[in-house]
Amino acid sequence: MLNYYMSIVSVNNLSRSFQVFDKKPGLFASIKSIYNRPERTVHAVEDISFEINKGELVGFIGPNGAGKTTTLKCLSGLLYPSSGDINILGFKPSDRKYNYLRQIGFVMGQKNQLWWDIPPQETFLLNKEIYDIADNDYQKRLDFFIETLDIKNVISVQTKKLSLGQRMKCEFVAALLHNPKVLFLDEPTIGLDVVASQKIRQFIKKINQEYKTTIILTSHNMNDVEELCHRVILIDRGQIKFDGQLSELTSKYTELKILRFTFETKVPKSTISKFGEIVDGNLLAYTIKVTKDKYLGVASEILSSFPVTDLNIEDTPIEDVIRQIYTDR
Amino acid sequence: MSFAKYIRIAKNTLQEYFVYRVNFFFWRLQVFIFFVMFFSLWSAISTGKSNLGVYTIPQIYSYFVIGYIIKALIFTTRTQDIGSDIQNGSISTLFIKPISTLKYYFARDIIDKLFNTFFMFFEFILILFLFKPSFSFPTRENFIYFLLFLILSIITFFFYSLVISFIAFWSDDAWSSRFLFGVVFVTIFSGQYIPLDFLPTTVAQILDYTPFPYMFYYPLKIWLGQVPSNIIYGKLFIGVLICLFLYFLSQLMWLKGKQKYQSYGN
């Protein structure tokens, strides 16, 4: 009951389908498609339900075409659901009410809200007017973002002349100047290098913690998910396959532990392979996969039988878990 | 309602023009070249004649020269961007903001018209200097009707152009429909190349019940004093009806289109 009252996002039996035209390859098929275009319905999202509480940072993960972005677009009000209900902050997003739109922000990794031909600061000023931000608040937040994201010398340069990383930082500023209660992030680190991605992740974390902004993100970058999201919603073929803590996902979908040994003297591969599947090894160090019910016994046996100088026991990396889930589809 | 945001949109739009100065210059140049071409053509046709159909020579010159001025006010538009913005999904960035998307385009439209009109005046001076055309001026009464019809033309074309752009919600062929209905039909059937009374009577009569003559032809005919005052109200009535029809059609398409919108691209 308490959860119900805390919930800021409530989705019930949401479905969204699209009509697509099928066309065979080649010129002849193109000509044929003028008078004969077989239509097909694609169910991008099918009967999904979930709730998100205030201040949560939830990650939507899933393979390409799973329905992550479609869900996000339905939540933001960009797409009308084919069926089902969405309630965010007491609004039906597809109504696109002024008071709803004032309280959300959306960063689309592959779409600019910044005006392309003029500097980002002009978009910021426009957003100041659109969201009716008071002068003081605007300056305070802008200063905070400039300092946090280190973009002092960036905001006065034409958007099209910025690097992808610089542009994404400015996209964040444009989406956050009005201090939205709910922030949607669609692939926020796509195409960014390691350093820029890290900076963006730190920023997202800071916004979530300092402003208690509810953040819903989709990402293929597992670093984003691991570093930011306690809760993940795994979506595949339009349906939710998992909704829970990231650690639960690992334990649910993998029965394996990773054991890393370093030896003082060389140990033959054939000897180690008896204990589990070798992932990596070079006679002096091995990484092996062992099932959860056996890993303690295996670790203890290797420790007692070989000259071990170092041992690490880890869960299967989330990236491997996800890869396995995708492969097992 | 705050207008500050629309003023800011207008300012940003203006800044965009300064980025693409050469683009704009070439755009105005092609408009000017087209004018020179048509003006020369009509001059050649009228050489040695005192009349061309129902037009005296000063009237035919006035038709094209005044037409050149009002074209900048009526037909320069940013509504043509809407079709491609729907097609490539970039209109999404407007849908998620607390702003009227149509007013956003209207604000850009206004700046586009003002900017073009500003430069058109310099070109107009150049036209006067180069061609020294003889002019026909309207009576005060006709001038007021002319202004009234001009406003109607601007609004009619705005909603017409919206309707054409909104086709993109349903069809991938937004560019071709824009070209045929928004460029070819408008330029020919609004009388930009040939005054409509040079067309066969039946065609002109049919066109009377389409939006096209009310976008360009009638304001000029009124300027020239060629629409009797007892007919003006009838034309105004039909023009307003067509404009209202386009307004309601555009609103309906907008409402339905937003529901159909697929937000292409991530």
Image (cartoon, coloured by chain):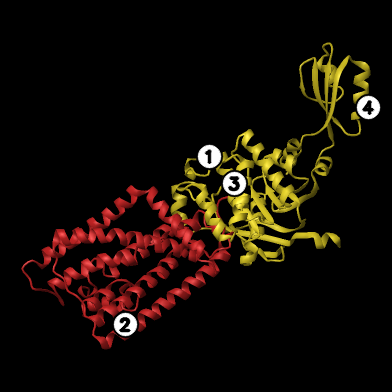
Q: Residue flagged by tag 1: what amino acid is it? A: Asn
Name the chain letter of the residue that bears numbered label 2.
B
Q: Nearer the viewer, residue B8 or B78?
A: B8
Q: Which of the two marks, 2 or 1, is nearer to us in this view?
A: 1
Q: Say above or below: A194 vs A281.
A: below
Instruction: Tell me whether the residue at label 4 lies in contact with that at label 1, contact meaning CB atoms closer than 8 angstroms.
Output: no
Instruction: Write down which chain is painted red.
Output: B
Q: Which residue is mark 2?
A: B235
Mark 4 vs mark 3: give the one in front.
3
Seen from the viewer's position, the closer of residues B74 and A71 is B74
Measured Cα–Cα span from mark 2 to mark 4 = 95 Å
Please identify, in this view, whether the residue under mark 3 or under mark 1 is nearer the observer.
1
Compared to B124, does A276 lie above or below? above
What's the residue at 84%, 32% (across, down)? A257
Whole-number angstrom distance, CA of label 4 to CA of label 1: 58 Å
Q: What amino acid is found at the position of numbered circle 3 in the picture? A: Gly
Amino acid under disc 4: Gly
Cα distance in 3D space between marks 3 and 2: 52 Å
Question: Residue under mark 3: which chain is it in?
Answer: A
Quadrant of residue A220 in the image? top right
Q: Nearer the viewer, mark 2 or mark 4?
A: 2
- The extreme left residue here reads B48
**Residues at discs 3 and 2 both on one chain:** no
Categorize mark 2 by other alpha carbons within 10 Å: few (<14), some (14-19), many (20+): some
Percent position of residue A170, x then y: 57, 46
Which residue lies under the disc numbered 3?
A109
Q: Is residue B131 shown left or right of residue A248?
A: left
Which residue bears the numbered disc 4?
A297
